[in-house]
C-alpha cells in the first residue's frame, strides 16, 4: 500500500530565504508526482507535475525534483515571499488507483 | 477553458440527513474523482468515475455514492450523515482515465454536520 510522507509538517522562515520541502513515498511504481498549493479552507492549485521519466520540473521560483528509485521528491522555493504562505501537498499517481496524498507542509513566510 | 467548479461552497446539515454535492469537470476531461479532506489532513480518495461508470473506490462506506452524467459532470451523495463527515470535499478532473496529465481540482465544498 502506497504511503506518502511529508517533512517537515510546518515551517516558518523570514522573507527571502530559499527553502526545501520534502516528500517521500513507499512504492516507486508511480506514473507521476504532483505538487499542490492549498490556501486555508480553499481547494488545491497545481504547482508542478513530474512524470515518472522526468527528473525535475521548474516554474518560476519553484523547482521540483523526483528520484523514483529512492522514493523521494523535493520542492525548492527560491527567495520566499509572504504570499508563498500556504500548505504544500505532494501526491503520487499509480496505474489503476487515484492520487495518494501526504498530509502537507504548512509554510509561513514572515516579512 | 473553464476549470473545475463545485457547488455549493458551504453547507450545514444535521446528523442523519442526506446531502448532494456537485462538480463540473474541466473542458475535455472525462474522469472525475472525489476526495474528502478532514482538518489538518491530506485529501482521502472516495471514488472515481470514468465515462459514467465508477472505476475505483477508496475506503468509504456505501452511504457515499456518486453519479457521472453524459457531460462528465458529477454528483457526490452522502446518506445518513455523521458528525465525522464534516470536511472539505474536493472534486478533481483529469484526462482519459489515466491521470497521466495530472489532476485539476475545484475549490471544494465545506460540509459541516451538526
Image (tube, helix red, strand yellow):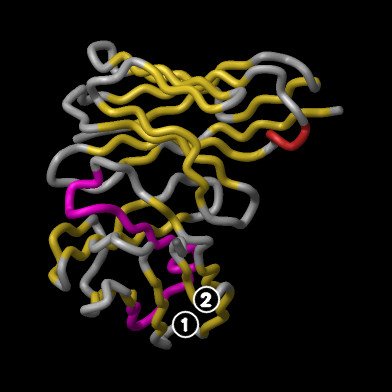
Q: What element carries label 1?
A: loop
Q: Which quadrant is the N terminus of chain B positioned in?
A: bottom left
Q: Is mark 2 on a helix, strand or loop?
A: strand
Packing grade of label 1 (10 A; few <14, some 14-19, many >=20) is some
Answer with left or right where residue A84 lies relative to residue A6.
right
Chain letter, disc 1 residue: B
Q: Give the residues in magenta.
A: B77-99
Answer with left or right where residue B9 lies relative to residue B63.
right
Residue A8 in sight in this render: yes
Packing grade of label 2 (10 A; few <14, some 14-19, many >=20) is some
Furthest-bottom residue in view?
B17
Q: Quadrant of residue A100?
A: top left
- Residue ID at (55%, 53%): B39
Alpha carbons under labels 2 and 1: distance apart? 6 Å
Residue A2 to residue B72: above or below: above
Answer with left or right where residue B11 lies relative to residue B80.
right
- Determine if the magenta segment contains residue B94: yes
Q: Which mark is residue B112?
A: none
In front: B69, or B11?
Answer: B69
- Residue ID at (41%, 17%): A65
Residue A103 to residue B76: above or below: above
- Sequence-earlier tag: 2 or 1: 1
In front: B83, or A17?
Answer: A17
Q: In which quarter of the image is residue B35?
A: bottom left
Residue B47 in sight in this render: no
Q: Which mark is residue B113?
A: 2
Q: Which quadrant is the C terminus of chain B positioned in?
A: bottom right
Residue A64 location (% of width, % of height): 46, 21
- Residue ID at (24%, 79%): B69
Furthest-front residue in view?
B1
- Residue ID at (31%, 25%): A25
Amino acid at each position: 500500500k502506497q504511503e506518502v510522507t511529508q517533512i517537515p509538517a510546518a515551517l516558518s522562515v523570514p522573507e527571502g530565504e530559499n527553502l526545501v520541502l520534502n516528500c517521500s513515498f513507499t512504492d516507486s511504481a508511480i506514473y507521476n508526482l504532483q505538487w499542490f498549493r492549498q490556501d486555508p479552507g480553499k481547494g488545491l492549485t497545481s504547482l508542478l507535475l513530474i512524470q515518472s521519466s522526468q527528473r525535475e520540473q521548474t516554474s518560476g521560483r519553484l523547482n521540483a525534483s523526483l528520484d523514483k528509485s529512492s522514493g523521494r521528491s523535493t520542492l525548492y522555493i527560491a527567495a520566499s515571499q509572504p504570499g508563498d504562505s500556504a500548505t504544500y501537498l505532494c501526491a503520487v499517481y499509480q496505474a489503476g488507483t487515484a492520487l495518494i496524498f501526504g498530509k502537507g507542509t504548512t509554510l509561513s513566510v514572515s516579512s | 477553458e473553464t476549470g473545475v467548479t463545485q457547488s455549493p461552497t458551504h453547507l450545514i446539515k444535521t446528523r442523519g440527513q442526506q446531502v448532494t454535492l456537485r462538480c463540473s469537470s474541466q473542458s475535455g476531461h472525462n474522469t472525475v474523482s472525489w476526495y474528502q479532506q478532514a482538518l489538518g489532513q491530506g485529501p482521502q480518495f472516495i471514488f472515481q468515475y470514468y465515462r459514467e461508470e465508477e472505476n475505483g473506490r477508496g475506503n468509504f462506506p456505501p452511504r457515499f455514492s456518486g453519479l457521472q452524467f453524459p457531460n462528465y459532470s458529477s454528483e457526490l451523495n452522502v446518506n445518513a450523515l455523521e458528525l465525522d463527515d464534516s470536511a472539505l470535499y474536493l472534486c478533481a478532473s483529469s484526462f482519459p482515465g489515466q491521470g497521466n496529465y495530472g489532476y485539476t481540482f475545484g475549490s471544494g465544498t465545506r460540509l459541516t454536520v451538526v
